[in-house]
Amino acid sequence: MDLMRLDNTRSGPAGAGRKPPSRRRGPEAGAILWPLAGVALLIAAWGGLAAFYPPILVPSPLQVLGELGRLALGGRLWPALTITVARLAFAFALGSALGIALGLAAGRSAVLEALLRPGMGVAAGVPPIAWIALALIWFGTGSPTPIVVALLVTLPVVFASTTAGVHAIDRDLLAMAQVFGLRGVALVRELYLPALAPHLLAGLATAATLTVRIGIMGEFLASDTGVGSAMALARTQLNTAQVVAWVLVALALLWLSEGLLLGPLARRAAAWRTEP
């Protein structure tokens, strides 16, 4: 049963909810060319600065690419990247699962929401560097510190977006679902997930970005493995080209998290809202 479609049919006579045939639109060239032009402009500006400053301050793009190639061929890039991806994936998955579960429960219970809001506010309001300092005291250096810090910044974001989505659900549609006997998992699948999709996607996008940024910062300050730790080591060696190379790796993780995670989620959300 598709409750979203059923809700559309009740708002008008037969055929009123039928969508007009959509026109086929190919990808616009400008949507690809302008971002590429922006990247080229950024690289050109970077190269211009590198021409006026010594490499220890501003390494050239070619120097950074060479350092990145040496990291890959020398066997340092892939182990560090694997460790970081495993930590970030675990923190993001756990934080998102807890945020969605608690957000669904809190959105349906004013008492539970009132109980959870202060704790979520503290988790979101405390600066990440403070969480890192506390995690260092609690767990020392190693994997737990970046994982816990990334979890603490992910959880409240997903919780807030999920709760807001539950509050935005049409109460008449919810009553109709209950009339049709939907309960438990079926109610979540048929009503809550399609209705929550826009809110969840926004929250997950923000949480994914924060997970990568804060997780790598946690590695930089409190771990001896991973991308952040390798970046910290390059800094102590005054190898600026290698520092920038690791920064590019971190940026690649940000882009991949959006392309490999949020893209499929967006397509699935669109399918939820259109499948018969």
Image: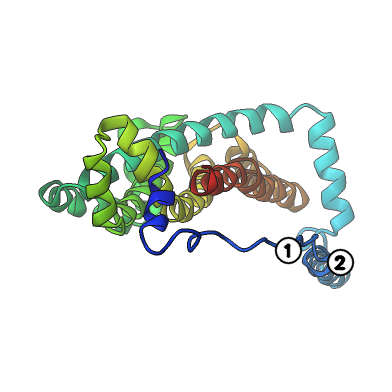
The residue singled out by tag 2 in the image is 47
Left or right: residue 19 compared with residue 56: left
Q: Earlier in the sequence, mark 1 or mark 2?
A: 1
- Residue drawn at (57%, 46%) of the image: 262
Residue 146 at x, y = what percent? Answer: 45, 38
Marks 1/2: CA–CA distance = 43 Å
- Residue drawn at (50%, 44%) of the image: 272
Closer to the camera in the image, 275 or 214: 275
From the viewer's perspective, is residue 40 above or below residue 71?
below
- Residue drawn at (64%, 41%) of the image: 260
From the viewer's perspective, is residue 170 above or below residue 87?
below
Mark 2: secondary structure? helix
Residue 33 at x, y = what percent? Answer: 84, 66
Q: In the rendered structure, which amino acid carries the disc numbered 2?
A: Gly
- Residue drawn at (40%, 38%) of the image: 1
Neighbourhood count class around disc 1 (C-alpha, 10 Å): few under 14, some 14–19, many 20 upward: few
- Mark sitting on residue 23: 1
Quarter of the rendering containing residue 97 = top left
The residue most toward the left is 111
Q: In the rendered structure, which amino acid carries the disc numbered 1?
A: Arg
Left or right: residue 35 compared with residue 201: right
